Image (cartoon, rainbow, N blue to C red):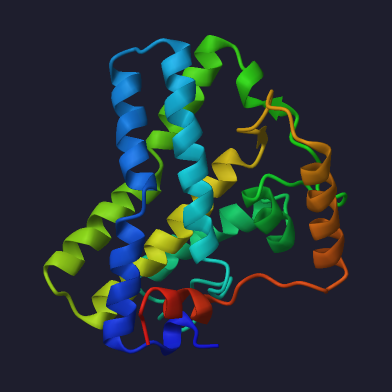
Amino acid sequence: MKKIAEMNRAEFRELLHILVNEELFKSRERLAAALAKNSPREALEGAFFHFHGDTEDLGFWFEEYEDDALHGLDASTPLAKKLKRQREHILANRKTTREQRIFRRMGIYLESDAMPEKKIVALPPAEFRELLHILVNEELFKSRERLAALLEQNASTEQLDAAFREFFVAYELLELAMEDYYYDPDEGLEMRPEFAEEFDQRIADYEAGRVKSIPMEEVFKKLGIE
């Protein structure tokens, strides 16, 4: 499987164009606008529903990328020092494994994954709004603007690589900010017994190694990236 570091310039740029145009960045603007208008909780919850789902979708793109965004980066540069501090913070505070995070993106908690104590739908109004303000102002959204601007400027592969590393770590910071909160977008909806049984079977198959996540190269193939 071809890793991001092994892509040619065209492949890498195509991937970055996809990432900076993910739905998350539109849903973030809608959520930020709702907060700015002091919208009622029901409207905020509706906007957060999309924001949360789009955050999970973006995370699937990073599953095949190396865990260490500092790999191959000159440790003496300001960027490397910044990312090192951020990565140390993430690793020191992260409570989940990569496998657990993959399943969380699908709305599933493994037996080894401790359920977060804070339930987003149960947060008091002020605390709920405070959390949303924190999320829409995460570094990821500033990083996305820098990366999008570089793509527009037809920047060098080296510049794009550096911006992508920032973008990748910024996503991890957003994910970390949400890690201690439980949110089930389907809460309150009835699941038919046959679907519940299928979910249980899929978890068992994954844990037994009978199924695997979709390789990134298959995703690229579907998108027409050679």
Residue 118 image position (x, y, % from top left): 69, 27
Q: Indicate left or right for 157 with 85 as reference.
A: left
Q: Indicate left or right for 90 with 72 as reference.
A: right
Q: Is residue 6 above or below residue 223?
A: below
Front in this rendered view, residue 154 or 45: 45
Residue drawn at point x = 50 percent, y = 81 percent: 217
Toward the left, the furthest residue is: 153
Q: Is residue 194 above or below residue 17?
A: above
Q: Is residue 47 above or below residue 220?
A: above
- Does any portion of residue 75 appear in the rendered image? no
Residue drawn at point x = 51 percent, y = 39 percent: 52
Front in this rendered view, residue 52 or 142: 52
Residue 34 image position (x, y, % from top left): 33, 21
Q: Is residue 107 above or below residue 70?
A: above
Pick the quarter of the image with the C terminus: bottom left
Q: Indicate left or right for 4 with 200 as reference.
A: left
Residue 187 image position (x, y, % from top left): 68, 27
Front in this rendered view, residue 66 or 218: 218
Q: Indicate left or right for 27 with 69 as reference.
A: left
Residue 191, located in which quarter of the rendered image? top right
Number of numbered labels in the structure image: 0
Residue 12 image position (x, y, % from top left): 33, 79
Residue 51, located in which quarter of the rendered image? top left
Residue drawn at point x = 62 percent, y = 25 percent: 120
Residue drawn at point x = 79 percent, y = 38 percent: 115
